[in-house]
Image (cartoon, rainbow, N blue to C red):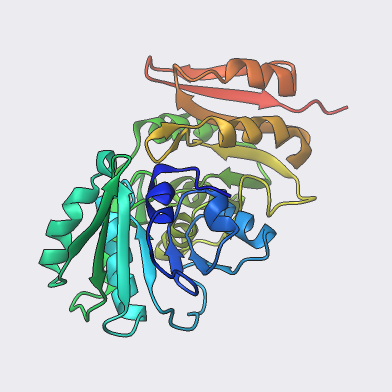
Amino acid sequence: MSAETPVCQLLERQDADYRGWWWVAPPRDSWLEQGEGTLISADVSVRAAWQAQGRPALSPFSPEASPPPGVVLFWPKSHALGEWWLLWLCQVLPEGTPMQLVGEHQGGIKRVLKVLAALGMGCRKLDSARRCSLFATRSAPQPLDPEAVWTRFEAAGLTLASHPGVFGHGKFDEGTGLLIEQLETALPRGQVLDMGCGDGILAAWMAQQGRDVTAVDVSSFAVEATRRSLAANGLNGEALESDVYSALAGRRFDAIVSNPPFHQERSIDYGPAARLIQEAPQHLTPGGQLILVANAFLPYADPLEKAFGGFDILADNGRFRVYRARLARG
């Protein structure tokens, strides 16, 4: 099996023994999923793909695995998130563990040199091809605790936890604000689901309104942020890792509320939003509602029509649009 993504194609051509290594925050790639070593990823969908191949796959919030002989870190689009991964790895790995950092030039991998220098970590370039570069370094003790990367901010009358790589990191999203304005009158009573919970602002707001809240996200960072946001406001709610509805088999809600993502790193990806809409009727009670906000240019009208037979537009400010679709009672 040949590597599919440019970063993995660069790794595939290396004369290196990666047996037993950790692969940290990689993209989906069959070459990796059918190879050697252990996955460390905050993306539950990537972990599920590895586990389907019988491969070990862990979250950074899982109990620590045995120290590996080495680590490959796939540099993310968010440089602050990349720095968090470096701090976390330096905390959990024995000093001097070999580390390789790989990424696309478009994603800013060349800035890794300055990041490593600021952390007092030496670095050498191993290879460059397919508009990607590969660097080598070793883990070293760091004075900054990865926990210090977590921040808090205020929005919609709530205290919210934030982490690099979580949607809306440290900022109040305009679309979410428009959605909350509509929820003040549109949100039904009962059990509600926050799909793609991010920093937990919708889950916390709905819990504050007295709803029984479940929040899910494909990102371990987002689920942890939501748990912290609920706790910071003294609110109750359930937060679960879930690839759309994967953790919710057999469960139904009176409302599903979402500001769904449509980006995967730098690429547009309608897949999660399409599944959110298509499978929503299976997770709503009779008469239940799907209420979501999206950029006005996104093509959600046809999927909503197909899944529900109709929908309403509750708000449209030219940039964002709030949709509501109801499941028939009969």
Tell me which corner region of the image, top left, top right, bottom left or bottom right, holds residue 163. Answer: bottom left
Residue 311 seen in the figure: no
Residue at 34 percent across and 56 percent down: it is 159
- Tell whether 137 sits left or right of 59: left
Q: Is residue 118 above or below residue 168?
A: below
Residue at 27 percent across and 84 percent down: it is 95
Which quadrant: the C terminus? top right
- Tell whether 285 sits left or right of 11: right
Residue placed most toward the observer, 102 or 82: 102
Residue 8 seen in the figure: yes
- Tell whether 289 sits left or right of 268: right
Residue found at the very far front of the displayed protein:
15
Residue placed most toward the observer, 134 or 200: 134
Task: Provide residue 218's location: percent of width, then percent of height.
Answer: 54, 51
Q: Is residue 316 above or below residue 115?
A: above
Task: Provide residue 117's location: percent of width, then percent of height.
Answer: 11, 65
Task: Provide residue 13's location: percent of width, then percent of height.
Answer: 40, 54
